[in-house]
Amino acid sequence: MSMYTQLLGFALDEHDDSDLPLAVGALRAELLRCRLRLLAEASSSDAIRTVTDQLAYDVALVGLAERLGIAWELGHFDQPVRERRSLERAVVARGIPLADTDG
């Protein structure tokens, strides 16, 4: 298990499901907020900030995926970019746009 996967596991354990909004629209809004922060920090040399932003995005993405009934596995985040893209595609396939250009 990669260090990132372990960190994500800890973040998910610490994240209380009761903290999640109930509506898919609110979950999507949180995901997009995290995505914007992640994109804004993309050129940052602050590795801790970058990992923190990635973890926040992945926690939001997993929360939305779970709400939509999309299966995921923590171990797949050993390759976080690949798993992130896979979950994003699954969310979009359920009719939830993840960017203004998605619909």
Image (cartoon, grey):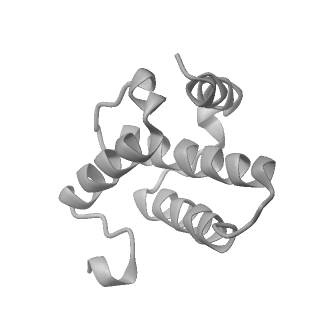
Residue occupying image coordinates x 45% and y 32%? 77
Q: Residue furthest top?
A: 1
> If the image is split into quadrants, where does the C terminus sit?
bottom left
> Quadrant of the rendered structure where residue 7 is?
top right
Q: Is residue 69 left or right of residue 83?
A: left
Residue 12 picture quarter? top right
- 11 or 18: nearer the eye? 11
User: So how many labels did they put on this image?
Assistant: 0
Judging depth in this view, the residue of 81 and 10 nearest the camera is: 81
The residue shown at (26%, 55%) is: 89
Residue 19 lies, in percent from the top left, at 66, 42
Residue 24, image quadrant: bottom left
Name the residue located 64 percent from the left edge and 48 percent from the top edge: 56
Seen from the viewer's position, the closer of residues 2 and 19 is 2
Left or right placement of residue 75 versus residue 54 in this view: left
Q: Is residue 64 above or below residue 70?
A: below
Residue furthest to the left in view is 93
Q: Is residue 14 above or below residue 42?
A: above
* Rendered location of residue 91, percent (x, y): 29, 54
Picture coordinates of residue 92 (x, y %)?
26, 61
Q: Residue at x 62, y 36 (%)?
A: 18
Which x, y percent locates residue 59?
56, 42
- Say above or below: 101 vs 81: below
**Is 14 displayed left or right of 36 in the figure?**
right
